[in-house]
Image (cartoon, grey):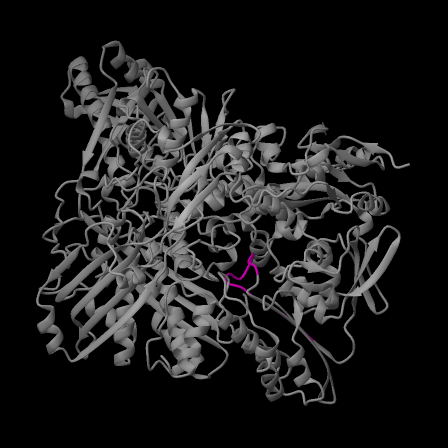
Amino acid sequence: MQAIRREIRFLLNDREQCIAEVSATDTVLDFLRIERRLTGTKEGCAEGDCGACTVLIGRIANGELIYETVNACIRFMASLDGCHIVTIEHLRGPEGRLHPVQQAMVDFHGSQCGFCTPGIVMSLYALWMQSPSPSRTEIETALQGNLCRCTGYEPIIKAAHAVSQYGTPTSDYLLAERDATMARLAAYKDGARVELSEGSDLAIVPADVDDLAVVLQEHPQATIVAGSTDVGLWVTKMMRPISPAVFIGHLDGLKQISSDGDNITLGAGATYSEAETVLTSNFPHLAEFWNRIAGWQVRNMGTIGGNIANGSPIGDTPPLLIALGAEITLRKGATRRVVPIAEFFIAYGKQDREEGDFVESIHIPKAAANTLHAAYKITKRRDEDISSVCAAFNLTVENGMILRANIAFGGMAATPKRAAHAEAVLIGQAWSEATLIAASRELGKDFTPLSDWRASADYRLRVSQNLFRRFWLEKGSADQTAQLVRV
Amino acid sequence: MNVQANTMKHTTVIKGAATTDLRHDSATKHVTGAADYTDDIAEPVGTLHAYLGLSEVAHAEIENIDFSAVLAAPGVVGVLTADDIPGVNDVSPTGSNDDPVFATGKIEFWGQPLFAVVAESRDAARRAAELAEVSYKKLPHILDAVQAIEAGGPCVTAPLKLERGDVETAMAAAEHRIKGQMTAGGQDHMYLEGHIAFAMPGEDEDVTVYSSTQHPSEAQHMVAHVLGVASNAVTVNVRRMGGGFGGKESQMSLFCAVAALAAKKWNRAVKIRPDRDQDMIATGKRHDFVIDYDVAFDSDGRIQALDGSFAARCGFSADLSGPVTDRALFHADNAYFYPHVRLVSKPMKTNTVSNTAFRGFGGPHGVIAAERIMEEIAYHLGKDPLEVRKVNFYGGEGRDLTPYHQTVSDNILQRLVGELEDTSQYQARRAAVLEHNAKGGIIRKGIALTPVKFGISFTATWFNQAGALVHVYNDGSIALNHGGTEMGQGLNTKVAQVVADAFQVDFDRIKITQTTTEKVPNSSATAASSGSDLNGMAALNAVEQIKARLVTFAAETWKVDPSEVVFAPNEVHIGDTRLSFNAFIKQAYMARIQLSAAGFYKTPDIHWDRAKGKGRPFYYYAYGASVSEVSIDTLTGEYQVDRVDILHDVGRSLNPILDKGQVEGAFVQGMGWVTTEELWWDDEGCLRTHAPSTYKIPLASDLPREFNVNLADWSENRELTIKRSKAVGEPPFMLGISVFEALSMAVASIADYRECPRLDSPATPERVLMAIDRLQDGEG
């Protein structure tokens, strides 16, 4: 019999919290600001885009205590069980001096109106813990999820470069407490399922993956909440009910990542950040692409499984996974079935997922010999933007002939989808620019894109066609001057 | 007395003097989260929350609103509609009586406030606001300025015409002539802190409103107008804003009015804070303009005549569209002399949110048009656009009169642009760009140098006044209050520096207090870049009054000539006597010297006759220039800004490091305006880019890869401004236009610069790619 607990337990700065009155839709930001009057954390957008609400969440992962930036506005309270949440109010440490990040921000004039500043300080704090003397690229990456409308960022970047002159992470108060914090968090783990509130507020935090399978059979219409980077907006923007909500972001059993033989297997609960290393080491072409998925906070929260399961036509990973020939394991109770990911997306808003099913894992074949890969994301703004068009290429070329072509697009149809006509033109043809151009002309048969605020139909089609040429220039002609190179 | 003076440690300079670098006075509070914004104020027990219900149609007659589900929703206390307004249902900042708090009868844009729900929590109010059943009778809607003109639609305010010389004759005689059109987009303010007002009822008719407004006096007057009470019953307080940029000049009045109405109706504190989507849908933004130009010029590129029309999407009401469209015309010359000129504004009424003030206030549209015209001429003649710019600069015999008949007497652009051209190595880099593009690769480059000349003063002359209140307490500490508001620009820091400097005391002796209508009445908006100019002078005036009394007191008491009373760093020297400032103030107090003064300032020498289109609307001009170099990807239209060099004129800066921050921030905001910040309405008139997920302002990674920003430290204001400084808030915004013109050059390389690309702003990657495609297809 699964033990059930009716409160969540977590650490807020240096205070232990045991809270029973938690509803499925309660956000961390409202808790901090309204319940605890910790008003240093700000609400700028309530959709995980501006970063004014950035806080750190500490959790035990693979036996280590790690701290990551998250957006408190779209993070739900129920997901905090067993975590350490650190807010801007905690940075000064017990003796009250400014933290090195704070002092650098003051000295380099990194704040003007100051409203985004606590969030920016938290992001730079997380960066400093990870990389005390960061490169320009690391700083920009850390700040992808933080908007500032006053400074133009220049003084913030200068401050970020200078932080190490003010102190090293070894002297940091939070890190000095690491062992004690780990012990406290470990003590929260009692193997119980957590059930909070009831009726239309019900939130369930399963004990483990098997318990999740049981819970979903008991509540087949439950909303599964992993990173809440999408479901969070259903609540904060659309005010949709999500109860019963089943929280899975904490499940270690869904975070397993393995790379053996010919396959990479990702637990569906692996976040973008957690999956980055295994994917970019096997597929070097993803290094830049991965960095352009959302912002840092969202990559720390959002999961690959969630990106697949919600079936969005503009998700970043589905086109990629389709092109790579990935499969997913769906589980209901003790029953599992494996589905090629390309077949999972049936129509807009409709996936091959039955009530009680959940995505358990994703299997990606490693790059085979003689394959050429690329992934492109086209957006209005380079970073932290949703794709106008997302394209992934996976071609097998032997002896100058294209043997296989797996090309998938996002943003071009109601689902992420392969470019079947274009692929057909490629197969069996010579690997040449002319072949790729000919294939690109078929795209109009594959797709009838929409016009919206991200891009017009004309642009979507045109840029998609041009990406075939880009692919040739990169892989066929190896023309390194054909790309914008970030310095 | 002398004993004390002799043992005192003398300092040679004060901390935080004017014209020195000093950090923002709230910097430590910002980085620790201790700086309080309106939403951070502790709520009294029983605080209620209001939330607006918005229309979901662009133009319609309201048939009925059924509130039964709203009122039955959990936590709801009641609903406010126009029927609950005891005064006037209007918050028009220009007295146009066309800005209802709540629509009655007719809906004029998608997102117009119809009612407010008041509930025990914000969440309850927000959820209940969705439950109203509104029935409409739809009417045809007009969404943009072109549609409005085609439909022969009305203007929201009287158009302006500026005219000088004989345009027709000059056009007919000219060697070259180009007609063209460009669209320059709007922009959302995207201040990180959205709109918010928090009202507390008082006794009698009193109400106190805490808000994030750039214009507390107007908010006060509007609340009084709506409540039907005298202004003296209403107090508006602003400690700080989380950004303003013009978006909180007139637009906050509605929120203040709703909070105050509810506070008085239920006799409880009431807060209203829209979410980001509602903030962006229901409140105004920068106008977008369609600009038509007809320009005549000679073979050197020197303009002979210009005929320009500036049509703006104003939205459903006048708001500030009159002065905004006026300012577009005032800046349609930017830095250039037009011998014969005619400029007209077309402030068109549309069924969209009423557009409002935004940093530059129409000026950017005038400037981007002038710069586009320079590019057109340069491509037509096959010249470097910089060469064309230079031959058209103001200056030289008979070439100093603006289209509004003000003489440009302080032009420093020749020197400033010359220095920037050298330090940025413009010529060598342009040659390198041309060479790069000649290779014909996928990545093309562009470089452009654009200047800005920006007129400083409110064109509504009466706004050019300010008040301040300075108290010296008998322990020598000082409290400073002025009518300006702090939105991040460091105004409070600068004004306190002025006071510190005038008294010769350390900056940290001065307590900066919240802006409140109780202390300084009838203040103007903190806008038009005027904050330091006006409030610094008003504060100085207050200090001078107190100092005059102190000098008289000292001269009489110590029996010295007034000229022998000197305010030295943290001391007062009276003949041979030296006293600490504190000791001296204590003695003045004991002698019953008044240690408080209200200061006042009005800008001299300005006047403007709108009907005649003549006058001197601006006290002076601020100048600047930027060079941007970009790379574009001709397969996708994506781009990056490789390098930017800026040289900007702030006169003799009150605080160089804060001014540099303004220049950098304004540039990046201007860059956003011309690149990725795109407002997109659907055919039904619903704004679909209403949150940062869909509306893209620059990120850290969008910054130029190399960014060199300098102030023209040799510049001094020729006018007697505070310490000979110049305004800085708006002028550098227009430096972002060099990014736009650099993108244009990169695109133009596709057709070997034979023609000026048809490129509208914002130049999104899509617009860049489509402009490339048109050139490749030979369509221009």
Q: Please provide percent x and percent y for residue B313.
A: 31, 56
**Which is more toward the observer, A11 or A328?**
A328
Q: Residue at x 47, y 58 (%)?
A: B703
Q: Looking at the figure, which quarter contains the C terminus of chain B?
A: bottom left
- Residue B24: image quadrant is top left
| Horizontal side, residue B339 vs residue B760: left or right | left
B28 drawn magenta = no
| Horizontal side, residue B51 vs residue B355: left or right | right
A377 drawn magenta = yes
Q: Is residue B560 above or below residue A112?
A: above
Visible residue check, residue B464:
no
- Residue B266: image quadrant is top left
Q: Please provide percent x and percent y for residue B186.
A: 37, 56
Q: Residue at x 54, y 43 (%)?
A: A52
**Which is more toward the observer, B762 or A11?**
B762
Q: Residue at x 39, y 22 (%)?
A: B264
Visible residue check, residue A217:
yes
Q: What range is drawn magenta here?
A: A373-386
Q: Looking at the figure, which quarter contains the N terminus of chain B?
A: top left
Q: Is residue B693 above or below residue B387?
A: above
**Which is more toward the observer, B94 or B605?**
B94
Q: Please provide percent x and percent y for residue B217.
A: 29, 32
- Residue B85: image quadrant is top left
| Horizontal side, residue A52 vs residue A173: left or right | left
Q: Please provide percent x and percent y for residue B572.
A: 26, 23
